[in-house]
Image: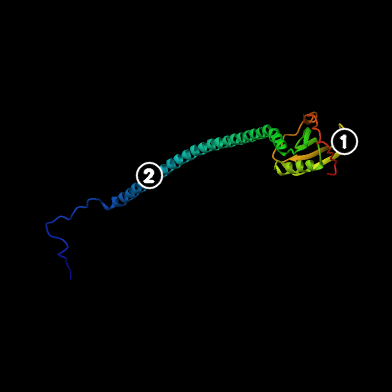
């Protein structure tokens, strides 16, 4: 018995034509995949190119900043050196000013500290040490003079009485003394090896002791 499917075709109607033969579909799909791949590769290359340019720009900016920082560091070093030089000059000026005012301060202090019945004959300076020589009518005047020098605040440590001896002047007994003190606020530069100590001398006439008074070293 023969069966015929009458629904599969319609008598008198031609079968539909295919737009793309099956043989070319695979080729077209491969071409499409190749195109998509090419687009992806091109996009990725463009992305890498943009990143490369961005990195180059950042590197150039960093190098320029590095150059600027090096220049700034050089300026800072120069400024620091200049500051140190100026500080040293200012310190030198202050030292010179102190050295200049030192003798004046010393003489004023010695003048204010001089007691009654005492006069000076010589002041010698060797570095920061001073030796003061003079005469006095009594030992009390010498100790008072040394105490006032000590309390003046310009000497370091106690003012030392190096010597005190009686001597006769016009048949009157007076005390010849010598004091030693170290400067505290005045620190003059050390004198050269060939330089002589600074010496201030004076030779006033010895005042005559009071009539009928004779003071020895034990007073």
Q: Nearer the viewer, residue 186 or 136?
A: 136
Q: Nearer the viewer, residue 84 or 194?
A: 194
Q: Nearer the viewer, residue 121 or 19?
A: 121
Q: Note whether 72 is above or below 44 in the view shown.
A: above
- Determine the secondary structure under disc 1: strand
Mark drawn on residue 68: none
Frontmost of labels 2 and 1 is 1
- Determine the secondary structure under disc 2: helix
Q: Which residue is mark 1?
A: 167
Q: Note whether 90 is above or below 12 in the view shown.
A: above
Question: Which circle's residue, 2 or 1, is located before the other in the chain?
Answer: 2
The quadrant holding residue 172 is top right
Q: Note whether 51 is above or below 1 in the view shown.
A: above
The number of discs equals: 2
Could you say where residue 130 lies in the image, as x and y percent from the top left?
77, 36
- Report crowding for label 2: few under 14, some 14 to 19, many 20 or more residues within 10 A (C-alpha): few
Alpha-carbon distance for marks 2 and 1? Answer: 119 Å
What residue is rendered at 44% in x and 39% in y? 57
The quadrant holding residue 181 is top right
Q: Nearer the viewer, residue 168 or 77?
A: 168
Could you say where residue 193 lies in the image, as x and y percent from the top left?
80, 31
Callout 2 touching callout 1 (CB < 8 Å): no
View extreme (front): residue: 212
Mark drawn on residue 42: 2
Could you say where residue 179 lies in the image, as x and y percent from the top left?
80, 39
Q: How is the image coloured?
A: rainbow
Could you say where residue 156 lies in the image, as x and y percent from the top left?
73, 43
What residue is rendered at 71% in x and 44% in y? 151
- Report crowding for label 1: few under 14, some 14 to 19, many 20 or more residues within 10 A (C-alpha): some
């Amino acid at each position: 018995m023969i069966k015929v499917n009458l629904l599969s075709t319609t008598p008198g109607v031609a079968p539909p034509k295919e737009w793309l033969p099956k043989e070319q579909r695979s080729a077209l799909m491969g071409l499409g995949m190749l195109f998509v791949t090419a687009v992806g590769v091109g996009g990725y290359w463009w992305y890498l190119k943009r990143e490369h340019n961005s990195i180059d720009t950042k590197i150039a900016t960093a190098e320029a900043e590095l150059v600027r920082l090096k220049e700034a560091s050089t300026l800072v070093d120069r400024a620091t050196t200049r500051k140190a030089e100026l500080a040293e000059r200012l310190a030198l000026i202050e030292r010179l000013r102190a050295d200049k005012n030192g003798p004046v301060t010393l003489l004023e202090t010695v003048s204010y500290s001089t007691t009654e019945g005492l006069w000076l004959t010589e002041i010698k300076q060797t570095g920061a040490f001073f030796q003061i020589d003079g005469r006095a009518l009594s030992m009390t005047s010498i100790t008072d003079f040394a105490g006032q020098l000590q309390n003046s605040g310009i000497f370091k440590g106690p003012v030392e009485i190096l010597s005190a001896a009686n001597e006769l002047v016009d048949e009157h007994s007076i005390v010849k003394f010598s004091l030693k003190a170290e400067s505290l606020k005045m620190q003059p530069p050390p004198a050269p090896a060939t330089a002589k100590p600074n010496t201030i001398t004076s030779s006033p006439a010895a005042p005559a002791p009071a009539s009928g008074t004779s003071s020895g070293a034990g007073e």
